[in-house]
Amino acid sequence: MKLNGLLLNENQIEHMKKITTFLLIIGMMLPGLTTQADEGMWIVNMLNRITMAEMQGMGLNLTAEEIYDINNASLKDAIVRLNGGSCTGEVISSQGLVLTNHHCAYDAIQGFSSTENDYLTDGFFAKAFDQEKHIDDFVISFLVRIDDVTETMLADVTNEMSEDERDAAIGEARKALMTEMNPDGEKELDLKSFYYGNEFYMFEYKTYRDIRLVAAPPESVGKYGGDTDNWMWPRHTGDFSMLRIYSGADNEPADFNENNVPYQPKRHLRISMDGVSEDDFTMVMGYPGSTDRFLSSWGIEQALDLYNPSVVEVRDLKLKTMKSHMDADPAVRIQYAAKYAQTANYWKYYIGQSKGLKRLDVQTQKQELENRFRTWMSEDPARAKEYEGTLEMISEYYDDTNASVRGKVYALEAGLIGCDISLFAFRFYRMAAGLFSEDAEEVAATQAAMTDYTNGHFREYDQATDRDLFVNLMTKFQNDIDPAYHPSFFSIVADKYKNDFGRYADKMYAKSFLVDAKRCADFIANPSQKTMDKDLAIVVGNSAIQTYFAGMANPAEAKFNRGYRLFVKGLREMDADRAIAPDANSTMRVTYGAVAPYKAADAVNYDFITTANGVLEKKDNSNPEFVVPDALDDLIRSRDFGQYADASGELVVCFIHGTDITGGNSGSPVMDANGDLIGCAFDGNWEAMSGDIAFEDELQRTISVDIRYVLWILDKFAGADNLVNEMDLVKGLR
């Protein structure tokens, strides 16, 4: 699982979530010991008052303070956020060594790769500190503390306020709170809304900027099974990589410098060599990106009928176009590897989500909840008054937006992020404003930033591939979508190029300075507003972004926001005896559950572990997704498993457990009852792809790579025992 990100602000991201139908939480009961999986991504400072008794009853040997404490070292000090929440990692040595997923470091591995040094294919393992590779623009953050600031944020808010008035009051409260809590501006604070604006929490972080690549297995290990096995169980993927945090001599964050030293953490995780057994307690800590479990029945309908199919259609064409070029040129394969993987990840996700929603009949479940809410409202005059029109406000929004959903999806998927040129042009144009400043320092800073951005863009850019993406996706956009939702530059294509995007592309890729690194560099050194304004690529980029945001502000949106806030508030009151976890929003959460098999379908029963034997059973060296290197094949056949074998002598590759995770959890530590590391989470199972909307305790499973397989790859396959030796391995503590 991997989240893709655009450089958009928080408000824009919230708007994007509305396009995806604002899928929200069903109220949930505290899980019982008899369930196979346990729902809830719990804020770590909530544990003592909500879930600790349940967790300890399932076997946890830790206190809430041992998990989260702001005064003493705790597990939270070993859990890290990668790049603002794209993935999670965990510190596993006293020298700042971090474990995460292979796909979380994929961009970095690709960036260091070339046809001469193909680390994607061959892997990379640093045998000494001086071999570790600094990753540009990669950061790792630690959570310092969480503060409940709900009372402060809502102090001046009343029920009689309009949504605009409410937003203004909250905005003023936010400004005052930031000034109070961060008067000198030195703290890294992030204010987050929970329960759809009913609660607010402040998060403080410390971010380290010198991060280096330490280890990455070859794709034949880290991506074994490729797109075929993505989101599937059984799995035989060693989805891991290792990074290291470097600091200044004072152990504080510092810019990259050869003299920086490995970071000394407050806490790092021990490595358990005990493995897993059925019903074992597991706990995951990390940064889940987004769940939307209050999704209304109308939102389900819109997702199934309009949103999900549109995403799949566009991404299907994008994947086919990229693959044709990647198969033809090894250099392009490396350049576009990460883009292809990112595109494919959520292409398959939305296919699976739709199937899951239909199979489990989630829309009917939502209708039943909404009917129960109506009954509850009507039973008390005060409630009826407070929540009057709540569901109608939600349903009206979907009625008003159904006509525009496909256009908005295409504006994003085909227009803004479909090909590289449109997004690059838009960002370049926005950044370029600083080039025309009268402040010499601002000009110099802008030039440096634009140079870095441009260089990064062209490292992963192939003009021929990009041209085909542009022509194919824009043609599809034109053919599939009502002209009312077309980007404005489509009229130029119609008038001057006879609706032929190929002809427009011929001129754009020939004339635009944005398709050539040198011409971009020349422009940055000698900018011209006139040159930008007439550039055909910039016309495309600005037109795409304008189209994307054009329909965002819907007349029904204010009512929609009010309706959902009241709905969430009302559900928590209606089911006051239930503990309801807030939606994921890239903040640190804890989730827990047992190691367990599951029944996928009639007569289809899955075990809870896979072994190295399965790697060879899937082997097909004619298929790039199932290549097994000779060295790995020999090691498995010789059963040279050493101390990493389980009690039966087998080498466990992956295991499944009933924890509640989503994108952003990739790389999260899977810990045992003692808080020791037993695995690294990297995926969910196909049968529960609707889990971000409706949790299914009989089906929901997290797929994790067994830590002993990780160590075995490092030691036996790669000869990187230096990394194993710096970890604290423990055994016999279960």
Image (spheres, grey):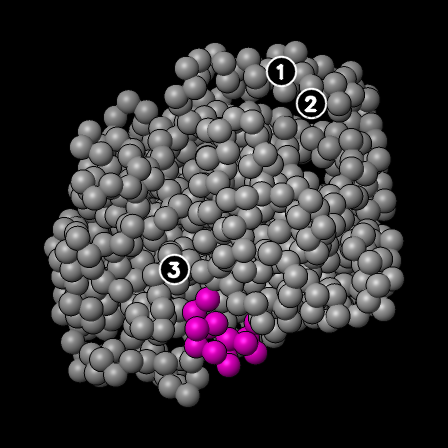
Does the magenta-highlighted stretch encompass residue 326? yes
The percent position of residue 253, horizontal first and vertical second, equals 29, 33
**Alpha-carbon span between mark 2 and mark 1:** 9 Å
Q: Is residue 639 left or right of residue 680?
A: left
Mark 2 or 3, which is nearer the eye? 3
The percent position of residue 184, horizontal first and vertical second, equals 41, 15
Q: Earlier in the sequence, mark 2 or mark 3?
A: 3
Determine the secondary structure under disc 1.
Answer: helix
Q: Nearer the viewer, residue 732 or 289?
A: 289
Q: Give, as a single range, the part of the protein colored magenta.
A: 322-335
Task: Please name the residue that numbered disc 3 is placed on.
Answer: 111
> What is the number of callouts on the image?
3
Residue occupying image coordinates x 83% and y 36%: 556
Residue occupying image coordinates x 76% and y 41%: 552
**Alpha-carbon span between mark 2 and mark 3:** 42 Å
Determine the secondary structure under disc 3.
Answer: helix
Q: In the picture shown, does residue 323 fall above or below 306? A: below
The percent position of residue 191, horizontal first and vertical second, equals 52, 27
**Alpha-carbon span between mark 1 and mark 3:** 43 Å
For residue 643, say whether it is visible. Answer: yes
Q: In the picture shown, does residue 453 fall above or below 710? A: above
Q: Say which amino acid is labelled 3.
A: Gly
Task: Please name the residue that numbered disc 2 is placed on.
Answer: 167
